[in-house]
């Protein structure tokens, strides 16, 4: 029997998108894959890559704002906006071999994925990732983007044979507001054997990694370190420009001189082994929007699989797992003072115990267990 083909569409820089890379890696042994998206080609053999540069010139943004404004009155403008984008037509031309299923990674890929699924008679799967209508909650975003995204979800998500998201609260909200219940596939990395190491009680090293985003307010963690005991050091491993990092450097020099460091980022496949060298993962995620409020982000699972103790703000979804597996401490709020108090409460013996608990948790929460859900889903949809 010939292998079936899945087309994966993701308008993100795929080489640095850990969730999409895991989907590709785990589906590739059983299916022929056509992957359409942006950026440089990842080092995964046997995949039919169809990658192109991400170009969104100023004129396109002006047109987008205009059509989104019109779309609030005439929803057909939202459809025009989708087909007016170059990526829509590039993707349509790129998929020249019939797939049996099309996986849309995030809402941006859903309209063209739905079109291709209809064209080829393929099964449509929609990975919503997070809750797209409230990705941001600025007045402009809620005025222009939220109605647009709501329209696209209502039009295209019902065409999907299956939907996926990253955590239960988002699945519940999609069901409550749009009538479909996604399967939860958490963004956990592959299980790895990580070496333990002794903790220097005078230099407890905290690590925070990932893509820089101002709405996550990383400066709160710097202020927290400034208020915490001198035994703590904070290392940032950020995917960011020098211009984005420079204000953080200045703030660190002001409030925690000599105790905050910025180290180069590594590719997604190397993150767990790199951060395992540290003592604890640190993440106070400001609840500046709905997705931040209920987040279960990649870096949280990286901490677990790396065998780190975890120190977080009072994010409910993360806090539930921290308390269930006892691999960390939850601050009483999202303030720097609360985070500093959480840090100061820790002893070396507690950190050692939490690190051991993280390694236990990793046995249950990892890419093997989460991606098994995705593989089962496709096997059921494709009658295997």
Image (spheres, rainbow, N blue to C red):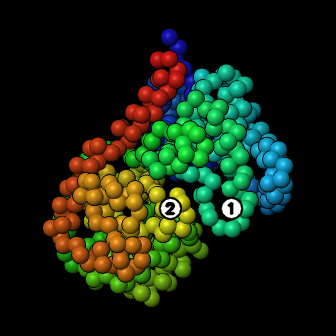
Q: Position of residue 230 (x, y in %)?
A: 28, 83
Task: Write the residue at 35% across / 44% down.
Answer: 366
Is disc 1 placed on a helix, strand or loop? Answer: helix
Task: Write the residue at 45% across / 42% down.
Answer: 184
Which residue, as the protein is rendered here, is positioned at the far bottom? 254
Task: Write the residue at 28% across / 66% down.
Answer: 329
User: In the figure, 32 relative to 288: above or below?
Assistant: above
Of label 1 and label 2, which has the lower sequence position? 1
Which residue, as the protein is rendered here, is positioned at the far front? 176
Is disc 2 placed on a helix, strand or loop? Answer: helix
Q: Residues within 10 Å of mark 1 (few under 14, many from 20)?
A: some
User: In the picture, residue 64 is in which quadrant?
Assistant: bottom right
Q: How many marks?
A: 2
Confirm whether residue 127 shows in the render. Answer: no
Mark 1–mark 2 contact, CB under 8 Å?
Answer: no
Nearest to the observer: residue 190 or residue 116: 116
The numbered dot on residue 358 is none
Query: Whole-Å distance between the Cαs marked 1 and 2?
Result: 16 Å
- The residue beneath circle 2 is 292
């Amino acid at each position: 029997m010939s292998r079936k083909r899945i087309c994966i569409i993701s308008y993100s820089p795929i080489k640095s998108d850990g969730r999409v890379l895991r989907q590709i890696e785990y589906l590739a042994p059983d299916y022929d894959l056509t992957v359409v998206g942006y950026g440089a080609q990842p080092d995964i053999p046997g995949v039919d890559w169809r990658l192109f540069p991400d170009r969104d010139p100023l004129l396109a943004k002006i047109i987008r704002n205009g059509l989104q404004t019109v779309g609030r009155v005439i929803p057909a403008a939202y459809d025009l906006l989708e087909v007016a984008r170059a990526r829509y037509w590039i993707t349509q031309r790129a998929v020249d071999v019939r797939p049996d299923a099309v996986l849309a990674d995030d809402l941006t890929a859903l309209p063209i994925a739905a079109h291709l699924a209809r064209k080829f008679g393929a099964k449509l799967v929609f990975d919503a990732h997070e809750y797209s209508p409230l990705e941001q909650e600025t007045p402009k975003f809620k005025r222009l983007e939220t109605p647009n995204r709501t329209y696209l979800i209502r039009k295209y998500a019902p065409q999907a044979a299956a939907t996926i998201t990253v955590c239960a609260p988002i699945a519940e909200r999609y069901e409550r507001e749009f009538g479909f219940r996604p399967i939860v596939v958490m963004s956990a990395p592959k299980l790895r054997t990580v070496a333990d190491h002794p903790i220097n009680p005078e230099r407890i090293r905290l690590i925070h990694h990932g893509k820089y985003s101002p709405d996550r307010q990383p400066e709160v963690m710097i202020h927290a370190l400034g208020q915490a005991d001198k035994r703590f050091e904070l290392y940032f491993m950020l995917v960011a420009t020098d211009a984005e990092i420079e204000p953080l450097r200045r703030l660190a020099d002001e409030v925690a001189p000599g105790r905050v460091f910025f180290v180069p980022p590594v590719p997604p496949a190397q993150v767990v082994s790199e951060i395992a060298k540290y003592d604890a993962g640190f993440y106070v995620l400001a609840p500046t929007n709905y997705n931040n409020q209920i987040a279960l982000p990649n870096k949280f699972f990286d901490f677990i699989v790396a065998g780190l103790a975890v120190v977080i703000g009072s994010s409910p979804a993360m806090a539930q797992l921290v308390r269930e597996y006892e691999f960390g401490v939850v601050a009483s709020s999202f303030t720097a003072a609360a985070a500093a108090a959480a840090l100061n409460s820790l002893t070396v013996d507690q950190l050692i115990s939490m690190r051991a608990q993280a390694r236990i948790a990793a046995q249950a929460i990892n890419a093997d267990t989460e991606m098994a859900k995705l593989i089962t889903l496709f096997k059921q949809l494709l009658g295997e």
